[in-house]
Image: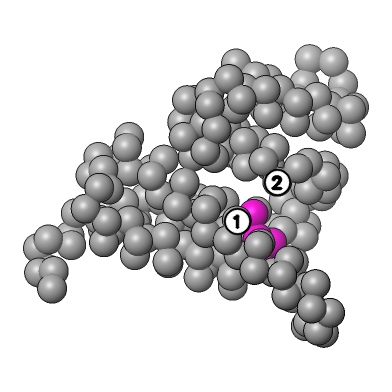
Amino acid sequence: MLQPAESSWIEPFVLALYRPTIQLATLLVRDYTVAQDIVQEAFVRVWLSPRTPREMSGFRPWLYKTVVNLARDHQRRQSRWARLRFGRAASADPMELAEGREADAVLGNAIRGLSRREQEAIYVRFFEDAPFDEVARIIGVRAGTARVLVHRALAKLRRELDPPSGHGMTES
């Protein structure tokens, strides 16, 4: 059993990364309650793993990759249940609520129109301001593939949003 002193190393990471990790999970699963469960599970898994990096530069991608994998697992389970044709209660879409508060429903709809991988790449690249090599590690692809995913997603978003020239996201 772990002693309290052995577990204290993770507390600053939880404080710093809980909110952005919840945002990532909510984007991926579109259910705030499920996102909270995924994030809690992710923090427990990385805390228990002896391979978890203990510096922020390594910890953050490790945690985000765990969240992405847990969200993918959740989506696979959901699609299996959906094929059984049992009725499911509809949950409130926290992404729509957030978009309403942010007055940015158009962008939210455009992002939801992207593929799952493109959503993951765009979120990590722009909302978390991660370099391409970190995007690649988090979503489980090569750096070149991460660049292509971001480039294609941005092209789709530009077509969907048709921003005035000189505005919008850039790929730097």
Observer-nearest of 40 and 49: 49
The relative height of residue 151 versus residue 113 in the rendered view (above or below) is above
The residue depicted at 72 percent of the width and 58 percent of the height is 95
In the rendered structure, the answer to whether residue 15 lies left or right of residue 40 reads left
Real-space CA distance between mark 2 and mark 1, rounded to the nearest whole angstrom: 9 Å
For the question of whether residue 120 can be seen, the reply is yes
Q: In the rendered image of this protein, does residue 155 appear above or below residue 17?
A: above
- Given residues 139 and 57, the one toward you in this image is 139
The residue sitting at 80% across, 72% down in the picture is 83
29 inside magenta stretch:
yes
Quarter of image, res 4: bottom left
Q: Earlier in the sequence, mark 2 or mark 1?
A: 1
Using a 10 Å C-alpha cutoff, classify the residue at mark 1 as few (fewer than 14 neighbours), some (14 to 19) or many (20 or more): some
> Which amino acid type corresponds to the residue marked 2 in the rendered image?
Arg
| Secondary structure at numbered mark 2 | helix
Asked if disc 2 and disc 1 are in contact, CB closer than 8 Å, the reply is yes
Residue 129 appears in the picture as rendered? no
Q: Which quarter of the figure is the C terminus placed in?
A: top right
Which stretch appears magenta?
Answer: 28-32
Horizontal side, residue 89 vs residue 61: left or right: right
Q: Quadrant of residue 71?
A: bottom right
Residue 3 position by quadrant:
bottom left
- Picture mark count: 2
Quarter of the picture containing the N terminus is bottom left
Name the magenta segment's main secondary structure: helix
Q: Is residue 40 magenta?
A: no
Which residue has dot 1 on it?
72
At label 1, the amino acid type is: Arg
SS at mark 1 in the image: helix
State the image coordinates of residue 105 (x, y, percent, origin top left): 82, 50
